[in-house]
Amino acid sequence: MSNFSKIFTTPLAKNNPITVQVLGICSCLAVTAQLKPAVVMAISVTVVVALSNLIISCLRNTIPPRVRIIVQLVVVSTLVILVNQVLQAFVYDVSKQLSVYVGLIITNCIVMGRLEAFAMSRKPMESVMDGIGNGLGYGIILVILGFVRELFGSGTLWGYPVMEKLGMYKIGYENNGLVIMAPMALILVGLIIWIQRTKDKELQED
Amino acid sequence: MKKFSNTYIFIYSAIIVAIAAVLLTVVAMSLKEKQNNNIRNEKMQVLLQAIGVNCSRDEAAQMYQQYFEQELTVGTDGSTMSVYNIKDGKMEQGEVRAFDIKLKEQQTLEKSGQKGAFPVYVFSKDGKKGYVIPTQGNGLWGPVYSNIALADDMNTVVGVTFSHDSETPGLGAEITTEKFQAPFIGKQILDENGQVVSIAVKKNADAAALHEVDAITGGTMTSNGVDEMLRVDLMRYQKFIDANRGAAPAAPVEGAVENAIEEEVTNE
């Protein structure tokens, strides 16, 4: 069991998809201007990575190496379209919220990255754990960014006007427009990487 | 590493793709009705929102029957092309319900020189009649939509909704917020001569002015798109408004409009 929990927890911090593997940066800039899309995106990615890891891991011995990327791509896009269809039918509001970003999960490097690096050579259960771990590792960063950017950029959290209720505007506080822009997400990711590497000497490179 | 023959690779790929295709088709087909229902109900929900009635998507169909009376389609020449009575579900004139019209198609028709049919929804709330005009235009990344609810005078805005497909969350997507939409209420789309002047979306708008509202900070392209959408789409109803506006002065002839504008300029 300790092996399982290790597979699950490593991607949360030590091998975090965003701050250590530096994958999936694109979507993490795009969907984190507010907290809610960030959370829904985190959940969707977790589901897709876990399921595609499972399927590819089950098929791993039958997949010819020469066309493996194509097979992976077919599996991932099928799953993403399924997720999108199901969202549209059963939780229409959430699907509207995410709009194009659901489709963009296909191009998220984390998904393909995990399939290549892990699922192609591991057993199904381990692969599922790895998928969930990586999805959540990605999700943590998304939520942190979403939290900071929505709070300081729009003065709200999950749409609730925090800054207004605290009376911050009355004492001359103003929302920072830069925080909602994509570059700020990149700067924040940089800060998180900095903090993480300062704490964890193992991650430091020469 | 295991060796795979070319035949195996071909067959394998074909099977994988076939499975994926069948799976997606089955799921898409079986969920189609549910998705379409969601879309129709949402359309009704949004129309209701525009006239200030908030309800859940499930209640929308019933509430729509309660508050809306007629669906019209009108041409840019002011003619009425179809009339659908919502209460008893009868087509009184024409064949296509305004509700089923795809605005984008009609806009394309109109642009290519043909006659487009543009929807108007007639509602009655608290004993007061009014009109909802749907519009569609382009934001920064994709289409933006709105419904403008006008009072009986076909001039004063009593409610609006804005929505979009893919504007940036926190920036352009803010057009869906109360903060952006509330200032529209009470504005007017006609000038004193009964000409459609729309409502401009611009920076540092004067809150007291009748024809402008504040744009979104950081969402300039989306704001411009909304501005353009309102202007272009509302103009199409000029003749319809002229013909149906009770208290309105008769549509002035060309010369008179120019004179009126000149007068205005000199007055200023």
Image (tube, rainbow, N blue to C red):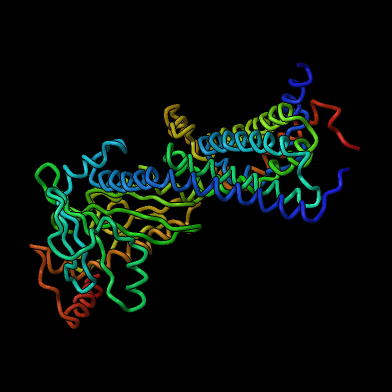
Is any atom of residue A101 visible in this view?
Answer: no
A36 or B30: nearer the viewer? B30
Left or right position of A80 against B118: right
x then y, percent, for residue A182: 61, 47
Task: Give the vertical position of A77 relative to A174 (above or below).
Answer: below
Outermost residue to the top: A1
x then y, percent, for residue A114: 74, 38
- Residue A18: name its quadrant: top right
At a point 35% along the width and 74% down the height, the residue shown is: B111
x then y, percent, for residue A154: 49, 39
A82 or B19: nearer the viewer? B19
At a point 8% along the width and 62% down the height, the residue shown is: B246
Left or right position of A134 against B257: right
At a point 18% along the width and 64% down the height, the residue shown is: B82
Outermost residue to the bottom: B255
Quarter of the image for the N terminus of chain A: give it.
top right
Quarter of the image for the C terminus of chain A: give it.
top right
- Residue B156: name its quadrant: bottom left
